[in-house]
Amino acid sequence: MAHQDFSLKHCMRVRWAEVDRQGIVFNGHYLAYFDVAITEYWRALGYPYPDALLARDCDMFVVKATVEYHAPARYDDLLEVCARVGRLGSSSIKFLMEIHRGAEHLVSGEVIYVNADPTERKPKPVPDFLREAIWQFEVVTPARK
């Protein structure tokens, strides 16, 4: 993917508590970085998670997350965490993720969410209002199903 294909880019700095003894970001923190960017994605759409989605009778549950490491981030690095929707299924949303330090591509990944009824916690279709907001926001049109 090209860096310019991402509709959401969120900057964050690596904190001391996120690195191991060698000063390299501990691998589990990359998923937390993805989560921060996806939270900012919802906010950019105008539906800050969780309240705005819950108010529309929706909730999102992660069903799959992958991380591919290309190079390590280190203490005090300024990172750009990028997110975009790569696919909109009937009840699922696949986010494509990248983390960059300047021009260097450090990490790739994906996070798949399923839209669910907040009370029953059972999958239900991604509502039209959310589909429309995603299609309007994205630089690259997400695949369908």
Image (cartoon, helix red, strand yellow):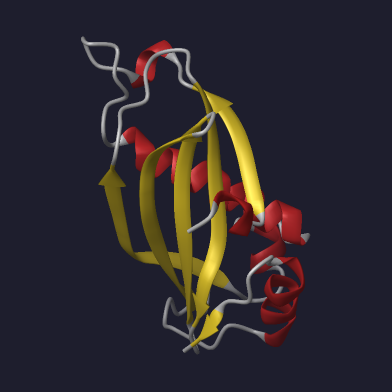
Question: Residue 128 in the image: x percent, y percent?
Answer: 70, 86
- The percent coordinates of residue 47 (x first, y second) are 73, 61
Q: Is 120 left, or right, of 70 in this rendering? A: right
- Judging depth in this view, the residue of 42 and 7 nearest the camera is 7
* Above/below status of 86 relative to 18: below
Residue at horizontal 43 percent and vertical 76 percent from the top: 121
Residue pictured at 50% horizontal, 71% vertical: 86
Left or right: where does residue 120 sit relative to residue 46? left
Q: Nearer the viewer, residue 106 or 130?
A: 106
110 on left or right of 116: left
Residue for point 52% across, 33% down: 103
Q: Percent from the top left, x then y, of residue 73? A: 37, 25
Q: Is residue 90 above or below residue 131?
A: below
- Which residue sits at x=62%, y=39%? 10
Quarter holding residue 16: top left
The mark total stands at 0
Is there any visible trace of residue 119 in the rendered image?
Answer: no
- Which percent across, then down, holds residue 132? 74, 80
Query: Quarter of the image holding residue 44?
Result: bottom right
Q: Is residue 56 visible?
A: yes
- State the residue in front, 101 or 39: 101
Q: In the image as oriented, which residue stretches furthest toward the left?
A: 21
